[in-house]
Image: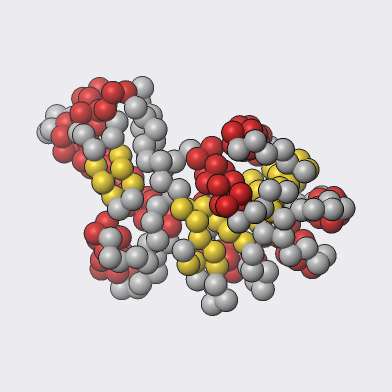
């Protein structure tokens, strides 16, 4: 009752990946998930999304959090005769090891990653191996200043830091804060936990670029928006 999601679900992220893959003819898909609770929940979401798309993965592999078995995973990928796409559900430490290992082994296959990996540190750590790496996004591009919410976010960041250093995570946190502030304002001066819940449920739809947030009717799902981004040769995220 007290949880209000803003971002889309992991299932929505992976479904968006699969839609893109099938659109461009990538139907021979391998699934790599991290060997921990995070990876297992991602595995369940991926299996649901693949089943909905009537796709059977050509391989279902597990990567350790520290990528200590990266060589074995890459070897298994190389043995697949018709691989043309990989869904990778892993945290940054494993992500930035398995992808370069695959590239160094001669695998040019496209890797699809969750939005949590779409950050400057991951882009830097991938080094020269960013080609063919796709990330989901849960907010619009934080560099797309034509959107009012993005422009407001940019102005606040630049005003506070004097720098034009923006990020997907920064914009997501900003939108989260705006949703909370909307609820607090509607709850009034003597806000309590239950009055905040009631306020959020009754504040109606709020639009943040492509994100539509509406908690009426007991819906706690938040936004359904999922985009895609890649890293260009200059290390920038482009959509």
Q: Nearer the viewer, residue 163 or 176?
A: 176
Colour scheme employed for the rendering of this structure? secondary structure
The quarter of the rendered structure image containing the N terminus is top left
Q: Left of 58 or right of it: where is 150? A: left
Residue visible at 67% across and 73% down in the picture: 128
Q: Nearer the viewer, residue 79 or 90?
A: 79
Total tally of numbered discs in the picture: 0
Residue 87 visible to an observer of this rendering: yes
Q: Left of 227 or right of it: where is 101? A: right
Q: Nearer the viewer, residue 38 or 11?
A: 11
Q: Quadrant of residue 51?
A: top right
Q: Position of residue 83 (x, y in %)?
A: 76, 53
Q: Position of residue 155 (x, y in %)?
A: 25, 66
Q: Left of 6 or right of it: where is 124? A: right
Residue visible at 30% across and 46% down in the picture: 177
Q: Residue furthest left?
A: 189
Whether residue 164 is situated above or below residue 55 in the rendered picture: below
Residue visible at 62% across and 61% down in the picture: 133
Q: Position of residue 152 (x, y in %)?
A: 24, 60
Residue 112 visible to an observer of this rendering: no
Residue visible at 55% across and 56% down in the picture: 135
Q: Position of residue 95 (x, y in %)?
A: 66, 55
Q: Left of 213 or right of it: where is 225? A: right
């Amino acid at each position: 009752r007290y949880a209000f999601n803003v971002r889309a679900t992991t299932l929505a992220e992976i479904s968006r990946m699969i839609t893109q893959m099938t659109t461009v003819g990538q139907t021979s898909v391998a699934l790599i998930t991290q060997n921990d609770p995070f990876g297992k929940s991602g595995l369940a979401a991926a299996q649901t999304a693949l089943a909905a798309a009537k796709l059977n993965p050509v391989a279902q592999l597990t990567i350790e959090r520290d990528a200590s078995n990266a060589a074995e995973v890459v070897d298994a990928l190389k043995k697949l005769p018709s691989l043309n796409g990989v869904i990778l559900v892993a945290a940054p430490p494993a992500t930035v090891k398995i992808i370069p290992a695959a590239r160094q082994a001669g695998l040019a296959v496209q890797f699809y990653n969750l939005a949590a990996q779409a950050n400057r540190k991951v882009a830097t750590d991938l080094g020269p191996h960013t080609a063919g790496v796709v990330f989901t996004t849960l907010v619009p591009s934080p560099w797309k200043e034509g959107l009012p919410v993005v422009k407001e976010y940019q102005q606040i960041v630049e005003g506070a830091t004097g720098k034009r250093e923006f990020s997907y995570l920064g914009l997501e946190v900003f939108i989260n804060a705006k949703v909370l502030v909307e609820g607090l304002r509607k709850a009034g001066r003597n806000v309590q936990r239950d009055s905040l819940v009631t306020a959020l449920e009754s504040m109606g739809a709020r639009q943040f670029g492509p994100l539509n947030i509406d908690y009426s009717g007991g819906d706690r799902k938040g936004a359904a928006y999922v985009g895609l981004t890649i890293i260009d040769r200059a290390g920038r995220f482009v959509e």
